[in-house]
Amino acid sequence: MIRNKHIFHIVQWALLIAISPSCNTTKMTTAVEKYNNGEFFAASQDFKKLYRKTDSRKKRKEKGEIAWYLGNCYDRLMTWSQAGLYFRNAQRFGYEDESLEARINDCDQKAGKYKSDAPESRYEIRRFNIVNSRRAEFCPSVWGDDSELYYTTSNDKATGEETSKITGTKYCDIWLTKKDENGVWQKPQSIGEAVNTKFDEGTPCFSPDGNIMYYTSSGAEEGIASSPVICYSRRTDASWSKGQRLHISNDIASVFAHPAVSPDGIFLYFASNTVGGQGGTDIWRASISGDKVAYIENLGDKVNSNADEMFPSVSPDGTLYFSSNRPGGFGALDIYAAREDEWGVWHVEHLGSPINSPADDFGMTFLHSTKEEQEGWFSSNRNSAKGYDNIYSFVLPSIKVRISGFVYDTEGNALPEAIVRIVGRNGMNFKSLTKPDGSYSVDIDRSTEYVMMSGKNGYLNRKAQFSSDGEEEDADYEVDFYLPSVTVPVLVDNVFYDYNQASLREESYPALDNLYQVLIDNPYTQIELSAHTDRIGSQEFNIQLSQRRAQSVCEYLISKGIDPQRLVPVGYGKEVPKTVDEAIARQYNWPVGQLLDETFIENLDEEQKKYADQINRRTEFKVLTTTLGLQ
């Protein structure tokens, strides 16, 4: 054992013996204003929304600044853990502040965290007290249908009367706890003396069908204490047969311990210091079939180091987990995940806190596991005055990434039962109907490009594209749709011309680009592009001016590639004044349905006359057909 106060770390003993998002709704200026006013909680809520919606790839500088503000907010709120997290993110995104490193260290010190370069994770842990005793419990393993949990223990009821000269406690046995019909874990019990001897047995694992248990034993040779070896036992009628040694190698001087079976049953992973390793103990694997081993191979220097690697386990999704005391961890044994790519190259990742600690952390097992979500148990001797190991449960909650928003008409009225379709590069193809308030909400994946479309009978379709962020954090993206009507004229807002001229001003281009996109989204639609003037001047002049203005808009759209047959320019001059709708009525207190004609405007005060004339000076389009070229 590297540190002989540990209980039954068998290999160690033997070594001694031998998205942009779209549509941000929270404005940066508003958040900064709240921060400057000392409204730190309110500011933090605004900054958090901005942080989630800011694309870290396209706007790293902006995201770094937001993270810096969040760090300061949480620092003022004395939430040191969150403050340190966002100061780190500010640093990661390149925010320039010479005091950042000191701020991070200060927050970590106040939060009782590890050094500033320690990785963190989303794991949530707690002690699994149903199995923990006053001694050591470690290396849990799930059997069969997840109704039984096996583990190693040195509790006072372990087999035999002798105590270990290394640890001063009893030798270890394999015990289990079972779920009752309500899914509640019951009082633990020994698996029996067919497997457990007066010496050490532990670190169990199981074949995929649950019929074979592999485990480590230091007393496999006729009850004589020996170097650790891997044994197996067969299950019959809910009991286990007498353990037998698994012949892995002719090397009888080396350690073979800590077995772990791959989900497909093809490989048995184990720890060994046999010849051909990288130094210390390494992770190896053997090709197995029941009690037969075809060959063994070292996993190489991507997994192994010149320190000690041990306690392998394999999750249901095929990820290899193991522990190592290599440099770069938190100290003692830390748990790492290793994934083998299609070329057979291993990629190793430290699990961070809270799974890892300055103490020994090892021996993971899984109830279920995907890349995004996990649940299971592991072992650690953290917070133990005597160094005894305990079993902890862990949960890696799924990251909740969601796209939501509203579907409106172009006047801002909610459209219920509008269709929202989402297609992603990950294969997602989802269709949803909006609620009575026009809202929709759909769960999506991280690091994925999406194309969206919304439509409704009586309205044109609109498309949107975005990419979700790859960061490991919950995120809410917002995409709203404004659907143009096919039955009433639609205002093309923010189209500007020089005074008494038909030439478009540059600030008109964004609005016309949006109209261009409407036509792209609806490729068989033909529209009338109409221009209107105010009441000032002769009708003859206004007709000519508005016709030229409508033509200017059409020419701009044609220059971007729109077929001229899809555009019909019409200048109406002042003969078709605007009719007051609900939005205009709310703003100016004019009657809904009122024509803004000369008679009505002449009775307004001078300020309201200006507003009415401004409203009448407009560019609109109306749909002539949605089937152009399809007849």
Image: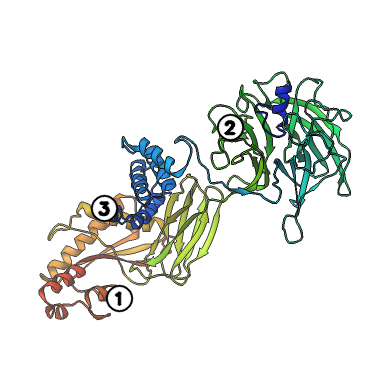
Residue 262 left/right relative to 576:
right
> Which residue is tagged 3?
36
In terms of secondary structure, where does tag 1 sit?
Answer: helix
Foreground: disc 1 or disc 2: 2
Image location (x, y in percent) of residue 544: 16, 64
Name the quadrant of the N terminus.
top right
426 w.r.t. 243: above or below: below
In terms of secondary structure, where does tag 2 sit?
Answer: strand
Q: Nearer the viewer, residue 300 or 247?
A: 247
Q: Tag 3: residue type?
A: Asn
Q: Nearer the viewer, residue 597 or 225?
A: 225
Q: Tag 1: residue type?
A: Glu
19 w.r.t. 289: above or below: below
Among numbered discs 1 and 3, the one appearing first in the sequence: 3
Image location (x, y in percent) of residue 599: 14, 81
Image location (x, y in percent) of residue 142: 73, 46
Residue at the image position 31 percent from the left and 69 percent from the top: 489
Residue at the image position 40 percent from the left and 51 percent from the top: 53
Foreground: disc 1 or disc 3: 3
> Which residue is tagged 1?
582
Residue 179, labelled with which disc?
Answer: none
Cβ atoms under marks 1 and 3 closer than 8 Å: no
Residue 42 left/right relative to 378:
left
Among numbered discs 3 and 2, the one appearing first in the sequence: 3
Q: CA distance from mark 1 to mark 3?
A: 38 Å
The answer to whether residue 105 of the structure is visible from this angle is yes
Number of marks in the image? 3
Q: Nearer the viewer, residue 461 or 397?
A: 397
> Which residue is tagged 2?
347
Q: Residues within 10 Å of mark 2 (few under 14, many from 20)?
A: few
